[in-house]
Amino acid sequence: MKADTGGRPWSRLPTWSRRAIIFAVLIAIWQAYTSLSGVSRFVFAGPADVAEAFVRGWANGDIAVATVTTMRLLLTGMGIGIALSMVLTVLATTTRIGDDILTLLSSMINPLPSVAILPLAILWFGLTNSALVFVTANAVLWPMTVNVSMGFRTVPATITMVGRNLGLSGWRLTRDVLIPAALPHIIAGLKTGWAFGWRTIIAAELVFGVAGAHGGLGFFINNSRYFARIPDVFAGLVTIALIGIVFDLVFGWVERRTVTRWGMKEGATI
């Protein structure tokens, strides 16, 4: 059962209205700082200017093209990272050598900032989108692998033994027993991997620039900074924030439809 909110007025408001109020307060603080602090518009833009740049950027296609480019690279890198993560975790679960390999690699590579290997990626793949996909896949792979591996390790031994008594082993045991039982950790790994991948692709585009005909959001922000279009810089940042909110809502919806509904989350409504 969910905890009692105590009947406080704020708690009785719908979730969307509470967050809308917080958002309005943040915008008001932003506007107040812009109006009262005397900060130069050359280095800081107010909400009205940013809103105008945001609408103009989407209307003329500049932000839309940049967003599509970044999302395409991100989803490609995420797909590769997730696939490699599943391979590594299945090997680590079913074999001793796989467990040793995963433990060693994750301890060495997971703490390494993914954007730090961008220079090597450029040397290996050249000034192409493959370099960006590589660093994004690396950013997604290790947090995803750590979470999924932990989920597999924390599956109750009784459940695993029941699966083995039914004749399941290897991939079938992983698919039919371990993955459903470790679903909360898998979703947490996806959320963490997405966040790491999203930050990495933006940072890599800021450093990397553009490959091919169009650049991504990172390139759009850096290019706007170069030409002193400060409202456009903020518009790009707002786009990144909005995409983050959309992904968070998607992951929340998936979690409610699976983990919460199946009673696998502490505090879920029963």
Image: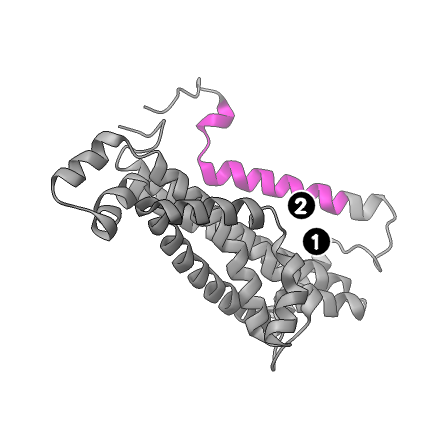
**Identity of the residue drawn at 68% across and 66% down:** 119
- In the rendered image, residue 264, in percent from the top left (x then y), is placed at 30, 33
Camera-side residue: 112 or 230? 112
Q: Tell me the element at label 1.
A: helix
Camera-side residue: 250 or 190? 190
Tell me the number on the disc at residue 132: none
Camera-side residue: 119 or 207? 119
The kind of residue on which mark 1 rests is: Pro
| Residue 7 seen in render | yes
**Identity of the residue drawn at 33% across and 44% down:** 93
Residue 151 against residue 198 in the figure, above or below: above
Q: Tell me the element at label 2.
A: helix
**Identity of the residue drawn at 11% across and 41% down:** 166
Q: Which residues are magenta?
A: 9-32
> How far is disc 1 from disc 2 in space, using C-alphas?
7 Å
Quadrant of the image containing the N terminus: top left
Tell me the number on the disc at residue 27: 2
The kind of residue on which mark 2 rests is: Ile
Side of 247 relative to 87 (left or right): right
**Identity of the residue drawn at 53% across and 67% down:** 133
- In the rendered image, residue 192, in percent from the top left (x then y), is placed at 49, 46
* Magenta span dominant secondary structure: helix
Camera-side residue: 27 or 199? 199
- In the rendered image, residue 92, in percent from the top left (x then y), is placed at 37, 47
Q: Is residue 222 magenta?
A: no
Please identify the residue farthest to the front as the structure is shown: 97
User: Which residue is label 1 attached to?
Assistant: 47
Q: Are marks 1 and 2 in contact (CB under 8 Å)?
A: yes
Q: Residues within 10 Å of mark 2 (few under 14, many from 20)?
A: some
Q: Is residue 24 magenta?
A: yes
